[in-house]
Image: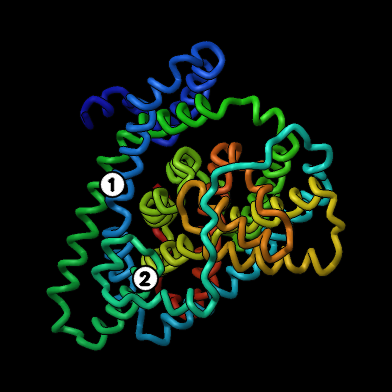
Amino acid sequence: MVVVFKLVIGNMNLSTFILISLVAGVAFGTLLNTTFPENIELINQVFLAPVGESFLRLIQFVVVPIVFSSLIMGLTRIQGAGQVGRYTVKLMTSYIVTSSIALGVGMGTAYIIQPGSGVTGFSLSADINLAESPSLISWLVSLIPVNPLEALSTGNLLQIIFSAVLLGIGIQIAKEKAKPFVELIESIYHISERTLSVILYVAPLGVFALMSSTIATQGLELVAKLLFYVLGLVIASSIMLCLDMSILFLLKADPIRFLRSLSEAIALAFGTASSNAALPVVLQNIQENYGLREEIASFAIPLGTALKRDGAAILQGFNALFVAQIYQVPLTPSLLMAIAVSSLLVSFSTPGVPGSALITMATVLSASGLPLEAIALVAGIDRLTDGLKTVVNIIGNSVNAIILSHWEAEQLPEVEQIPAR
């Protein structure tokens, strides 16, 4: 199969081929929805849904080994626990600042555009499982894994990061006695990286199936009904992306080269709508194509994938104001503060999987005293906007990794960037 895709792609850039497949998926899904609606269920069940799900599972197959091994390798290059702590403090500082900006962009855009004004004709009933969010203390305690192997088997990124940090510190203390284990980890990383390169050859087919399934089953009629809602999210996301590029420009980090380097990851993020699925490609692109320091990238990118989600911050703030406008709830300072605080906290705990924002949206609406049934309004359109949110997530995460790299320039003057390919 790999050979077949190589022949089909030829010299075409993989990211370009993924984008072409994405557009073709939208077109095919629209054709099914408008011309052959009676065949949608059969085609989706027999072909589109299984192919899309299979591709996501293939990508997730390499997420855990790549994240775990790259973290261990990166931490062995970091000089002591003090440097790990410094990285973490600096990253969390930039996360809070940039996520707050993203939240302000989302809420500001919703306040100006008023996407909820005049929205009618929707049923406010939906079968959505609204799990109660744990308290902050419980969430922090849950980050410590009882069994590191269980964290690896369940794919819990935060627990995997915690385990890798502890093992990395242990490796530095053990020194030469840890050398065989480090060699094993390096072998796992290189094998996983080569496996990923094979999996990416089926990415165009997977993205085509995912987009076709979404458009065929949801249709574009819902987009038309919620035109200002979708337009508002597009504007807010575009503003945040421009701010990210401005940060790179001020850091003299070459935003054009940055976007070109991450083109594969961006296309995959949009097609899969999953930060977790895009993680291995982001990590590979930002090191090999952009040349970000390995010890920075291998620590900051997985941590950011687990915590840093500007797209989620934009979406939660935007959605809360959207709901308030629908129900004509006055936007008092106390309401705006409740929305802002809850949206910011929730953005750090949103899982990097498709549709997760709908579940965490319940926390924001509850904290703000807004009706939970309004989640049904955006449930149908969520998958179509999820891709854009994921692109904002991975770009914001990568930009913060670059911020850390520049922040650490004085501490690591001997490390030079790898020239772009």
Front residue of 155 and 257: 155
User: What is the x, y in percent for residue 224?
Assistant: 70, 28
Answer whether residue 258 is visible to the viewer in this image.
no
Front residue of 107 and 374: 374
* Residue occupied by mark 2: 159
User: What is the x, y in percent for residue 60?
Assistant: 32, 50
Counting other residues with Cα less than 10 Å from the Cα at mark 1, is it few (<14), some (14-19), or many (20 or more)?
A: many
Q: Residue furthest top?
A: 35
Question: The residue tagged with tag 1: helix, strand or loop?
Answer: helix
Identify the amino acid type marked 1.
Leu
Question: How far separated are the C-alphas under marks 2 and 1?
Answer: 23 Å
Q: Residue at x 44, y 41 (%)?
A: 272
Question: The residue tagged with tag 2: helix, strand or loop?
Answer: helix
Instruction: State the image quarter where residue 384 is shown.
Output: top right
Front residue of 287 and 197: 197
Instruction: State the image quarter where residue 100 is shown.
Output: bottom right
User: What is the x, y in percent for residue 313?
Assistant: 63, 58
Please state, as top left, top right, bottom left or bottom right, where the N terminus lies in the image: top left
* Residue occupied by mark 1: 196
Q: Residue at x 67, y 50 (%)?
A: 242
Identify the amino acid type marked 2.
Gln
Counting other residues with Cα less than 10 Å from the Cα at mark 2, is it few (<14), some (14-19), or many (20 or more)?
A: many
